[in-house]
Image (cartoon, grey):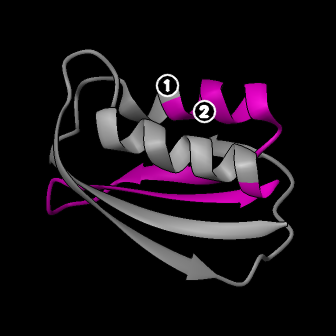
Amino acid sequence: MVRRRVVVHGRVQGVGFRFSLARAADARGVSGWAINRPDGTLEAVFEGDPDAVESLVRLCQEGPRGAEVDRVEVFEEEPEGLSRFDAR
């Protein structure tokens, strides 16, 4: 199991980004959360199988329709043992 925290910059709020990540995470069996931050970025945490987590990190680089991703910061962290994915 691995954990990645991402911060997505660009036009990433108001386009359904958190909910598209929740659907993709559920489909891949990945736990974590996604939240819109006050500075206009989106922050998300993914915990699970390394390949599934990396596929979600790649998804963040494109975003859903309507998003314009400028850059994605990725941080490796120790897994906490989260049990589900929340779009906060």
What's the residue at 27%, 15% (across, down)? 65
Residue 59 x %, y %:
45, 36
Q: Residues within 10 Å of mark 2 (few under 14, many from 20)?
A: many
Give, as a three-letter code, the residue at label 2.
Ala
In-front residue for pair 15/5: 5
Residue at the extreme front of the image, as rendered = 51
Does residue 82 lie above or below 14 as drawn?
Answer: below
Residue at 42%, 52% in the rendered image: 35
Name the residue nearer the viewer: 83 or 60.
60
Label 1: which residue?
Answer: 20
Q: Residue 52 in the image: x percent, y percent?
A: 72, 44
Instruction: Decide if residue 41 is on the left or right side of residue 62.
Output: left
At a point 19% along the width and 18% down the height, the residue shown is 66
SS class, disc 2: helix
Choose between 5 and 35: the one closer to the eye.
5
Magenta stretch, residue numbers = 21-50
Residue located 56% across and 43% down the image: 56
Of the residues shown, which amino acid type is indicated by label 1? Ser
Q: Is residue 31 magenta?
A: yes
Mark 2–mark 1 CB contact (< 8 Å): yes
Marks 2/1: CA–CA distance:
5 Å
Total number of numbered discs in the rendering: 2
- Residue assigned mark 2: 22
Whether residue 74 is visible here, answered yes or no, is yes
In terms of secondary structure, where does tag 1 sit? helix
Image quadrant where one finds the N terminus: bottom right
Task: Establish if 40 lies above or below 68.
Answer: below
Looking at this view, name the residue that lies furthest to the bottom. Answer: 78
Q: Position of residue 85 (x, y in %)?
A: 70, 44
